[in-house]
Image: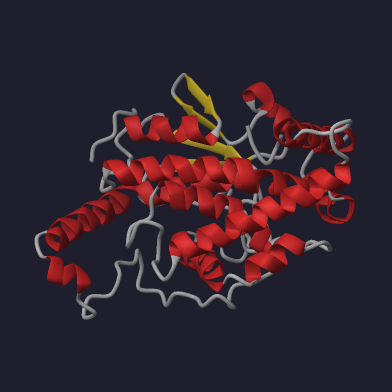
Amino acid sequence: RGCRVNMASPMELSCWGGDWGLPSVHAECLVVMAYGRFSGAPLKVNIIDNLWRAPRGSVPLLVSDDIVISQPAKILNFLRKQKYNADYELSAKEGADTLAYIALLEEKLHPALLHTFWVEADNYYTVTKPWFGSRIPFPLSWYLPGKMSREALNRILVTKGGPPFCSLAEIEAQIYRDAKECLNLLSSRLGTLPFFFGNMPTTLDAFVFGFLAPLYKVQFPKVQLQDHLKQLPNLCRFCDDILSCYFRLNITGISPAGQDPVDANLQKLIQLVNKESNLIEKMDDNLRKSPQHPPRKLTTLKLSTAGEGNSSANHLTP
């Protein structure tokens, strides 16, 4: 699985840092970070403190040689072109399902995620504003969180409508109804599988993890959506298992800044072994269904249960 990127100039990913047991508290940064781990892409993660240092002021941001890319979907497309593809085993129907579920996440869950972090007053003033403000140099720390909050509200209103057609209270109620329905649908779709399309994580798993993990882990005073998520143990297990298997070095919430990138050769070897394993399984349907063969896991770590790992905390950044 060769890479066309010149390794003398590694791919660098700029994103917000982590807390509460997460490698990043920013949903869209988590999407890209997870996909990088799933596909074996050798990303060098740079934790940024000042949003304005990033070109066009948006994160996550991928830089490779003279190429600068923002927005998760565009970054993932670029990684696929470099032959880091987590979806190579998917059928055409599964690829179409992936697009449909990602659209569902953007329409139904993302507005509630924005509202929880940036619009709900108690959450914003006690958690979101202090957390982001402490990581932005003065005097931008006084201005930037408020700007991000206003832009989050604008994005919600563009998606859901607003006064004079309906009140903000009506919009809020609809946002959370839609989000809970989306969570229920995801839980039903996942069932008892380790990932949404079986034993290997794909693009859809990266998006679901990126959107769910902050809702699951960040400790907010207003937790109506978090409480609903915790009533769906398979989704909680899904988040905990990805954190344990793919981000175990950062499970305590320590910033990955300063750590060596995951060894690219090891990641490639894992991907090759996984691919050969899947080819063997496809040659024998009985082997695929046999209870004697447990699902493939990245590591031999014991996967956590739904009740474990609940430790403290284009875009979440509007």
| Residue 313 appearing in the image | no
Locate residue 22 relative to residue 82 in the image: left or right.
Answer: right
| Residue 5 appearing in the image | yes
Residue 146 vertical position relative to residue 17 in the rendered view, above or below: above
Nearest the eye: 296 or 82: 296
Q: Position of residue 5 (x, y in %)?
A: 34, 29
Q: Residue furthest front?
A: 165
Residue 133 vertical position relative to residue 208 in the rendered view, above or below: above
Q: Position of residue 209 (x, y in %)?
A: 53, 55
Nearest the eye: 58 or 110: 110
Q: Quadrant of the N terminus?
A: top left
State which quadrant residue 226 falls in.
bottom right
Q: Residue furthest left?
A: 283
Q: Position of residue 106 (x, y in %)?
A: 59, 41
Question: How does the figure colour the protein chain or chains?
Answer: secondary structure
Locate residue 10 relative to residue 223 in the image: left or right.
Answer: left
Q: Quadrant of the C terminus?
A: top right
Task: Say which residue appears at 33% left-offset and 40% top-offset.
Answer: 84
Residue 23 vertical position relative to residue 35 in the rendered view, above or below: below
Q: Residue furthest top?
A: 66
Task: Say which residue appears at 86% left-offset and 36% top-offset.
Answer: 146
How many numbered discs, if any?
0
Residue 96 vertical position relative to residue 222 in the rendered view, above or below: above
Q: Position of residue 196 (x, y in %)?
A: 41, 57
Task: Say which residue appears at 82% left-offset and 61% top-offset.
Answer: 222
Locate residue 216 relative to residue 66 in the image: left or right.
Answer: right
